[in-house]
Image: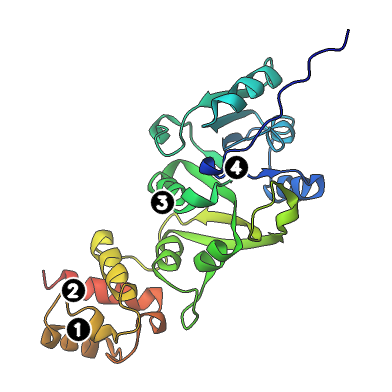
Amino acid sequence: MNQPRAPRFIPKKSLGQNFLINPHIRDKMIAACHLKKEDMILEIGPGRGVLTEPLAQRVKSVLAVETDKRLVDQLQDQFKNSPVEIVHADILSFPFETLPAPIKIIGNLPYNIATPIIEKVIRHREKIDSFYLTVQLEHGLRMLAAPHSKDYGSLSCFVQYYAKVKKIFNIKNTAFAPPPKVQSCFLEILFYKDPPFQADNDVLLFKIIRQAFGHRRKTILNSLSGMRDKESLHEVFTSLNINPTLRAENLSLRDYVRIANVMSNLE
């Protein structure tokens, strides 16, 4: 008698499911993570376990957080009696404060929630040794962008304030199933112990940056005028030798930190 066929797994578009299927790309990712036998790994979105298996063979432990219950059941069966713990949870609500330290984070991030995941990782950076992630290429270029470029924006400044970001390689959409409509890239994020440019008030710094890039067609003087009167802003820019007619993308992260530090003293 023929055995009944297992039901075909149908990825959920709402969960941003695009599964890595290219073994060459998998091996490049694993090699790029500089794994050591004593490493503890948090894997975000293990999916079908394509990265989970080689990770488990190389490190002390893997905590794999998967939001799709259908995959959780498969993964728990696949990795029983191994150093892999499969947790059914949404990574955005998972309690990072319970993670051991130091921990490496590895994940092919769902493109639709990549930014909030990155923000959450940054908030818990004191626990994290390094962060290796696959994101949409356009998203990666925004994190890597330098001043005077169209990709440079508030995300660039936010990530680069806390970490050194490096693109390791690009990934064609055919490396995934179903193939996304966009290309991807694999990044390394290493957090600074102390930011190269230290803001006295991080909250104010990123408020200024969001305000500036929220009106990026305006001059920096006009874009920040919603926060201070123009006369005060002129004094700030003059004291820092910053041209007030520049636009948001023309200012470096160091410039924004300097502006924030002067403005914090005016509060």
Residue 35 x, y percent position in the rendering: 68, 41
Residue 197 x, y percent position in the rendering: 37, 68
Q: Which mark is residue 263?
A: 2
Query: Badge 1: few (under 14), some or many (20 or more) residues near its Cα, within 10 Å?
Result: many
Q: Is residue 128 left or right of residue 223?
A: right
Q: Identify residue for label 4.
A: 17
Of labels 4 and 3, earlier in sequence is 4
Say which residue appears at 31% left-offset and 70% top-offset: 209
Tell me if residue 99 comes above or below residue 156 in the rendering.
above
In front: label 4 or label 3: 4
Q: Identify residue for label 1.
A: 236
Of labels 4 and 2, earlier in sequence is 4
Q: Do the numbered discs 4 and 2 sit on residues whose CB atoms are within 8 Å?
A: no
Say which residue appears at 40% left-offset and 84% top-offset: 250
The span from disc 1 to disc 2 (Cα, nearest Å) is 7 Å
Q: Identify residue for label 3.
A: 119
In front: label 1 or label 4: 4
Of labels 3 and 2, earlier in sequence is 3
Of labels 1 and 2, earlier in sequence is 1
Element on which disc 1 rests: helix
Residue 226 in which image quadrant: bottom left
Q: Is residue 183 left or right of residue 140?
A: right
Of labels 1 and 4, earlier in sequence is 4
Query: Badge 3: few (under 14), some or many (20 or more) residues near its Cα, within 10 Å?
Result: some
Q: Do the numbered discs 1 and 2 sit on residues whose CB atoms are within 8 Å?
A: yes
Of labels 3 and 1, earlier in sequence is 3
The span from disc 4 to disc 3 (Cα, nearest Å) is 20 Å
The span from disc 4 to disc 2 (Cα, nearest Å) is 44 Å
Which colouring convention does the figure follow? rainbow
What's the residue type where badge 1 is placed? Val
Residue lying at the far top in this picture: please name it: 1
